[in-house]
């Protein structure tokens, strides 16, 4: 079994977890190269709520201030009924309670911030490098990555940060493919000035819940110059190609939101949004999730993190945060392994270190998922038609939606906390094989 230190890491994927890992490794004096399949000018769509736990990770990378500058603080989102009565509150963060506010920004902005930081710090980022396959050699402790252009690179560790449809995962868990969850979010994005009669000062983050469906609206930027709105609709599974076609059909996407949201019982405000937003502002996000039993390969030289390891239901609003937590805790784990190698103690095992990281992370992800499912089912239940039942569910919703609910475990998560647990487990299970 390998007992050489990890000096070079190849990272596949320049989304959120990839560049965060590269930056975190650099803080532990470990070199990495980032390979992104798409061109450098590619832009991802949508916005993201970076909750307090995500902000703590970004602060560890020295990026909290920069992150604040690319977004706006958005700690909560109201859940209201058609009459505007507040049914509950979704909490993403709080500077007072958890040390950091939640920051709402564009997904592309946080991705670019992380990638720019890599380049500023001299980390090599190579675009147009589509990864196609990997292997590991247990004798030499070398992992090999192959790319569509024929290039082959070697490293001590190969990390797949390549998203929910990960190719790297194939090298670890062949045949595990993401599951479609029967829902698609259809979104609109528009300049506030496009919507007749809309006062941008009145735009608040909220989800309107009714027996006829749910509709969310939030400012896309600090001054609400732009607005994002979306609804999650039920639909059948499609192949990758069919989803591509579905996503490209912006006329069809707009029509999907117009029916039902351009008529009763929806307010004029919502009707105006779905009818007056230009067609080019519509896109969609089909919900896929994945669970795999192991994040690492047989010999520990290939592994996955972020969405590639555990695509979460989007209603969690935690996919990006988990990706950041994975990255920083993994970098620490690798650094721990390198340090243990240079100490006089018995030779440590890379695989053992990575398995402990995996177990700790997997437990946390399961807890986040459990909370998401509970809150989603309570939210969905308010859509039932019986008034009496709705009253009961509204009460339950208030209870799970933030106020009075202990969220420190979620938003107070820290690398130091992880380290304590890691060291405890390492001491408990022993090291070396
Ligand atoms: C519309 C939308 C809204 C969201 N809102 C939130 C939110 O509010 N809060 C939150 O926490 N999360 C949110 N998420 C989820 C969050 O964006 C993801 O969980 C997060 O981006 C996962 O990061 P990642 O680095 O693991 O994967 P990704 O960000 O998907 O990055 C994967 C990267 O790998 C590259 N890649 C893929 N295959 C290859 C290959 N073969 N070779 C080379 N490169 C490859 C891709 O091009 C991509 O750049 C949202 C997601 C969407 C789609």
Image: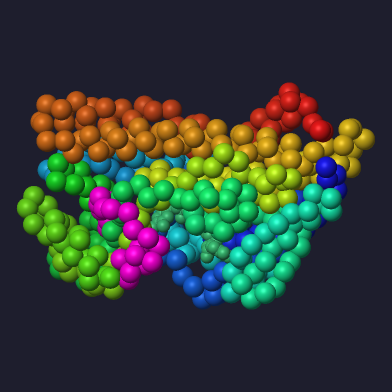
Q: Residue at x 65, y 45 (%)?
A: 296
Q: Where does the image place residue 184, in percent across and percent down from the top left?
A: 31, 54
Q: Is residue 303 visible?
A: yes
Q: Residue furthest top?
A: 428
Q: Where does the image place residue 249, in percent across and percent down from the top left?
A: 28, 70
Q: Which quarter of the figure has residue 378?
A: top left
Q: Nearer the viewer, residue 189 or 78?
A: 189
Q: Quadrant of the C terminus?
A: top right
Left-right relation of 285 to 175: left
Q: Where does the image place residue 159, in percent across and percent down from the top left?
A: 66, 54
Left-right relation of 354 to 74: right
Q: Which quarter of the figure has residue 251?
A: bottom left
Q: Where does the image place residue 3, in percent across and percent down from the top left?
A: 85, 44
Give, as a single range, the part of the protein colored magenta. Answer: 223-248
Q: Nearer the viewer, residue 414 or 244?
A: 244
Count of all numbered marks drawn on residues in the image: 0
The answer to whether 270 is drawn above or below residue 419 in the figure is below
Q: Is residue 370 magenta?
A: no
Q: Residue at x 64, y 62 (%)?
A: 133
Q: Is residue 226 magenta?
A: yes
Q: Is residue 14 visible?
A: no
Q: Residue at x 25, y 41 (%)?
A: 79
Q: Residue at x 59, y 48 (%)?
A: 173
Q: Nearer the viewer, residue 28 or 259?
A: 259
């Amino acid at each position: 079994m390998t007992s050489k230190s990890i000096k070079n890491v190849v990272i596949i994927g320049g989304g959120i977890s990839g560049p965060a890992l590269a930056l975190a490794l650099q803080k532990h004096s470990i070199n990495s190269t980032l390979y992104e399949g798409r061109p450098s000018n590619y832009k991802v769509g949508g916005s993201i709520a970076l909750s307090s736990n995500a902000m703590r990770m970004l602060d560890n990378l020295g990026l909290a201030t920069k992150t604040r500058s690319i977004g706006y603080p958005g700690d909560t989102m109201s859940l209201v009924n058609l009459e505007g009565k507040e049914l509950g509150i979704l909490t993403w963060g709080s500077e007072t309670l958890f040390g950091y506010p939640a920051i709402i920004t564009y997904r592309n902005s946080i991705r670019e911030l992380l990638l720019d930081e890599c380049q500023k710090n001299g980390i090599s980022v190579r675009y147009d490098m589509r990864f196609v396959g990997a292997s590991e050699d247990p004798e030499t402790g070398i992992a090999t990555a192959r790319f569509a252009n024929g290039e082959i690179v070697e490293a001590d560790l190969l990390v797949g940060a390549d998203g929910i449809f990960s190719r790297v995962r194939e090298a670890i868990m062949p045949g595990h493919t993401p599951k479609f969850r029967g829902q698609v979010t259809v979104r609109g994005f528009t300049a506030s000035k496009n919507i007749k009669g809309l006062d941008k000062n009145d735009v608040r983050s909220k989800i309107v819940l009714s027996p006829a469906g749910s509709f969310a609206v939030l400012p896309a930027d600090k001054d609400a110059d732009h607005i994002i709105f979306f609804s999650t609709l039920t639909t059948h599974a499609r192949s990758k190609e069919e989803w591509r076609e579905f996503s490209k059909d912006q006329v069809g996407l707009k029509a999907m939101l117009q029916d039902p949201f351009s008529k009763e019982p929806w307010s004029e405000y919502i009707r105006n949004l779905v009818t007056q937003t230009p067609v080019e502002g519509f896109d969609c996000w089909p919900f896929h999730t994945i669970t795999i039993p192991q994040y690492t390969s047989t010999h520990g030289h290939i592994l996955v993190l972020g969405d590639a390891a555990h695509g979460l239901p989007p209603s969690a609003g935690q996919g990006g945060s988990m990706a950041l937590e994975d990255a920083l805790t993994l970098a620490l784990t690798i650094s721990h392994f390198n340090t243990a190698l240079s100490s006089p103690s018995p030779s440590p095992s890379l695989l053992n270190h990575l398995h402990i990281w995996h177990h700790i992370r997997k437990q946390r992800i399961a807890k986040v998922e459990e909370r998401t499912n509970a809150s989603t089912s309570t939210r969905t239940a308010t859509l039932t038609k019986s008034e009496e039942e709705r009253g009961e569910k509204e009460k339950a919703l208030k209870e799970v939606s933030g106020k009075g609910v202990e969220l420190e475990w979620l938003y107070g998560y820290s690398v130091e906390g992880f380290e304590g647990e890691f060291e405890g487990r390492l001491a408990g299970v022993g090291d070396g094989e």
